[in-house]
Image (cartoon, coloured by chain):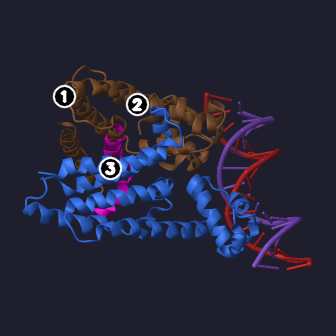
Chain colours: A brown, B blue, C red, D purple
DNA sequence: GTCTATATAAGGATAGAC
DNA sequence: GTCTATCCTTATATAGAC
């Protein structure tokens, strides 16, 4: 809580990220954000005018730390299988540090008031990945499958445990602090899965 | 809209399901539910006392139509691989008819006010599936892997496209009505994937 | 820039007539 | 059981002093 060095605007943004990600837009209160920031409610409006505008700033910031970083894993040269395994590692390691982000993003794009936020999401994965798949297919390096289905599968394998963490913690009877270890181990488990799926 | 035959209580429940599943607990308004039900707000409280109580009824009802039906796929005898492929088919076909249910459940169990609702979820899959996996492993019928990780994977493969539907519709540039066709095709695609992962 | 006090609106819940 | 009218709390937003 070394907020001493942050400007008021930064303190507000930091607090807003914490509260919006934890409670969602509808479940968040401006008063809660002010409390976490250690300032009063009026200042939120002084800096950001409205709850909507503050939320949009938080969403923009989080999106920019999310998709580009993970998509970058797809940018380097190499065979399709390598790109995918690299993506899995980057994605899960990012989620281990940002476990609430997936539900936050999914709620936003599924919210009828916020549906146009989908435009803010830079969805590079399909474009970057699918041509590479077909190139490798021609060379016999990968099995025949539907690359769109495969992309959905890989993303789901990575993200879902973070979304359903309370259910898995309860179902598998694990301690909360064990969860991160399981996610770390999951990286290699998923690499094995995708190699089995992709190798002809 | 043949609500004529329904009792008032049933009309309210039906409307509450629609609104709570679409907008979430925090995003839902008692007035919206009353409007959808075609009655006035006071009647909601007459029948269900409070928003919390109404929500709990909706959650209970949906959970009872969800987990038991899908878990039942795991109950019949047979090899592990067959159970999994049967589960995939039952699960995806259920989700095609209930596309909003996953986000609704995940938001509920991740909501700090509703976290104890996790106890209502009958999580049979781990108990039913993991012993069967080890039995088949001894007979050399399945590859060595971590069954807990595998369960998370299968669930994620099935559920995630429904959670992220707006993103995939945008990313893959598909029409909204094509989505269901893709999910239908997904059943066989996923059956192939799990066979590749599981077969020694 | 930061605070306290307050305006204004929204939404859950209830009272009371029919 | 069903309605209209209203209460009361909560929450966003603003006014104005410092």
User: Are the residues under badges 1 and 3 in a single subunit?
Assistant: no
Confirm whether the magenta stretch covers residue A161: yes
Q: Quadrant of the N terminus of chain A?
A: top left
A109 is higher (above) or lower (below) than B66: above
**Chain letter of disc 1 in the image:** A
Confirm whether the magenta stretch covers residue B171: no
Residue A39 visible to an observer of this rendering: yes
Residue B115 located left or right of residue B86:
right
Residue B111 visible to an observer of this rendering: no
Span shown in magenta: A151-174
Label disc, if present, on residue B188 of the rendered structure? 3
**Chain letter of disc 3 in the image:** B
Name the residue at 67% across, 57% down.
Answer: B29
From this viewpoint, which residue is outermost toward the left? Answer: B139
Residue A193 image offset from top left, x and y in percent: 21, 44
Count neighbours of disc 3 (C-alpha within 10 A) and say few if under 14, some if 14 to 19, many if 20 or more. few
Q: CA distance from mark 2 to mark 1?
A: 30 Å
- The residue lying toward the viewer, choosing from B154 and D14, is B154
Location of residue B48 by image quarter:
bottom right
- The residue lying toward the viewer, choosing from A40 and B101, is B101
Which mark is nearer the camera, 2 or 1?
A: 1
From this viewpoint, which residue is outermost toward the top? Answer: A77
Mark 2 vs 1: CB contact within 8 A = no
Name the residue at 63% across, 37% down.
Answer: A52
Q: CA distance from mark 3 to mark 2?
A: 30 Å
B199 is higher (above) or lower (below) than A144: below
Label disc, if present, on residue B166 of the rendered structure? none
Residue B185 located left or right of residue B107:
left
**Residue hosting label 1:** A140
């Amino acid at each position: 809580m070394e907020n001493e060095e942050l400007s008021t605007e930064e303190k507000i943004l930091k607090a807003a990220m914490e509260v919006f990600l934890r409670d969602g837009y509808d479940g968040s209160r401006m008063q809660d954000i002010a409390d976490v920031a250690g300032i009063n409610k009026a200042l939120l409006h002084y800096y950001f005018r409205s709850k909507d505008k503050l939320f949009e700033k938080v969403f923009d910031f989080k999106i920019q730390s999310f998709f580009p970083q993970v998509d970058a894993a797809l940018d380097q040269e190499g065979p399709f299988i390598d790109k995918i395994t690299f993506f899995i590692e980057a994605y899960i390691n990012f989620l281990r540090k940002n476990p609430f982000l997936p539900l936050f993003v999914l709620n936003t794009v599924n919210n009828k008031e916020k549906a146009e936020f989908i435009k803010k999401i830079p969805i590079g994965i399909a474009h970057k990945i699918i041509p590479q798949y077909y190139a490798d297919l021609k060379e016999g390096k990968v099995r025949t499958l539907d690359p769109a289905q495969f992309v959905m599968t890989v993303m789901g394998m990575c993200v879902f445990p973070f979304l359903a963490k309370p259910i898995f913690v309860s179902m598998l009877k694990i301690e909360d602090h064990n969860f991160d270890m399981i996610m770390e181990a999951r990286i290699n488990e998923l690499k094995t899965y995708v190699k089995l799926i992709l190798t002809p």
